[in-house]
Amino acid sequence: MNKSNLIKIILNKNKKYKFSEIEKIVDLFFKEITNALTNQRRIELRGFGSFFTKIRDKRIGLNPKNGQKIEIDKKIHPKFKMGEILFKKINPK
């Protein structure tokens, strides 16, 4: 599913809104998640899961082409941890 599919699904369930209004809401939702992660804040959506960042320290790696050692800079990676309700829906007994 991509963003336009998501907008269409929401539009089909909420006929009183226009496509452009739902598109703005979805854009705002993702923008706020992005802003929070950029500022290294945690986002928790109860039952769904939480988004957070992890810092990977500077390290030495290998260039796969020639096997030489290279220095890999410190990076911040986004992470997602599934909530219990979502986990149970994906993994029914």
Image (cartoon, rainbow, N blue to C red):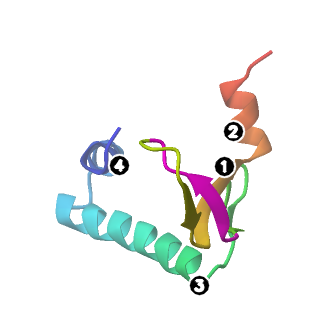
Say which mark, if any, is on residue 29: none
Residue located at (66% from left, 78% from top) = 41
Q: Which residue is mark 4?
A: 10
Q: How far is disc 4 from disc 2 in space, using C-alphas?
A: 19 Å
Q: Disc 2 marks which residue?
A: 86
Q: Is residue 67 above or below residue 41?
A: above
Is any atom of residue 70 visible in this view?
yes
Mark 2 vs mark 3, CA separation in Å: 26 Å
Q: Label 4, secondary structure: give it.
A: helix
Question: What residue is pinned by disc 1?
Answer: 48
Residue at mark 1 to residue at mark 2: CA–CA distance: 5 Å
What amino acid is found at the position of numbered circle 4 in the picture?
A: Ile
In the rendered structure, which amino acid carries the disc numbered 2? Answer: Leu
Whether residue 35 sits left or right of residue 52 in the image: it is left
Please tell me which residue lies in front, 22 or 13: 22
Look at the numbered disc 2 and give the secondary structure of its residue. helix
> Residue under circle 3?
39
Amino acid marked by disc 3: Asn
Sequence-wise first label, 3 or 4: 4
